Image (spheres, helix red, strand yellow):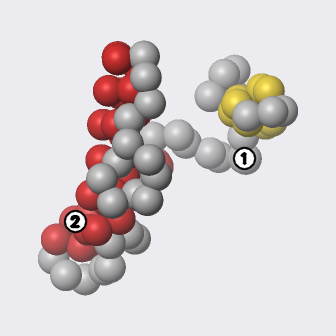
């Protein structure tokens, strides 16, 4: 947030700014996330993504980092890409 407003970057459209909703408190996003995590641990709520999807996401992010460091494309095993 910047001066009571929100800015976001959208590929192909650049930076977009808009006013935050009334009584919006940015930190509440974290509080809500922690509450949901606690409910999941207590088996009172469902996690929004599967463990398999989370693992694929981490593998993708690691491959992105390695690709940037090595300055060449990286292939994810089992992705069908060559």
Q: Is residue 75 left or right of residue 2?
A: left
Instruction: Count neighbours of disc 1 (C-alpha within 10 A) and say few if under 14, some if 14 to 19, many if 20 or more.
Output: few
Q: Residue at x 22, y 65 (%)?
A: 38
Q: Earlier in the sequence, mark 1 or mark 2?
A: 1
| Residue 16 appears in view | no
Give the Cα separation between the discs numbered 1 and 2.
Answer: 28 Å
Residue 29 to residue 20: above or below: below
Where is residue 60? Give x, y as percent: 37, 45
- Helix, strand or loop at mark 1: loop
Instruction: Count neighbours of disc 2 (C-alpha within 10 A) and say few if under 14, some if 14 to 19, many if 20 or more.
Output: few
- Helix, strand or loop at mark 2: helix
Q: Is residue 20 left or right of residue 59?
A: right
According to the image, label 2 marks what residue?
Answer: 38
**Residue 5 vs residue 11, the one in the foreground:** 11
Where is residue 79? Give x, y as percent: 40, 57
- What is the quadrant of residue 73 in the picture? top left
Q: Residue at x 33, y 60 (%)?
A: 78
Q: Residue furthest front?
A: 82
| Residue 18 appears in view | yes
Q: Residue at x 62, y 45 (%)?
A: 24
**Residue 49 vs residue 67, the one in the foreground:** 67
Where is residue 44? Give x, y as percent: 25, 83
Task: For marks 1 and 2, give the one nearer the viewer.
Answer: 2
Q: Residue at x 26, y 68 (%)?
A: 51
**Tag on residue 46?**
none
**Residue 46 vs residue 68, the one in the foreground:** 68
Where is residue 43? Give x, y as percent: 19, 81
Q: Residue furthest bottom?
A: 44
**Tag on residue 22?**
1
């Amino acid at each position: 947030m910047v001066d009571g407003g929100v800015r976001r970057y959208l590929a192909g459209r650049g930076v977009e700014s808009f006013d935050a909703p009334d009584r919006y408190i940015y930190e509440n996003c974290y509080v809500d996330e922690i509450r949901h995590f606690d409910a999941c641990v207590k088996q009172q709520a469902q996690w929004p993504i599967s463990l398999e999807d989370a693992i694929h996401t981490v593998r993708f992010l690691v491959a992105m980092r390695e690709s940037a460091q090595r300055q060449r494309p990286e292939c994810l095993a089992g992705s069908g890409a060559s």
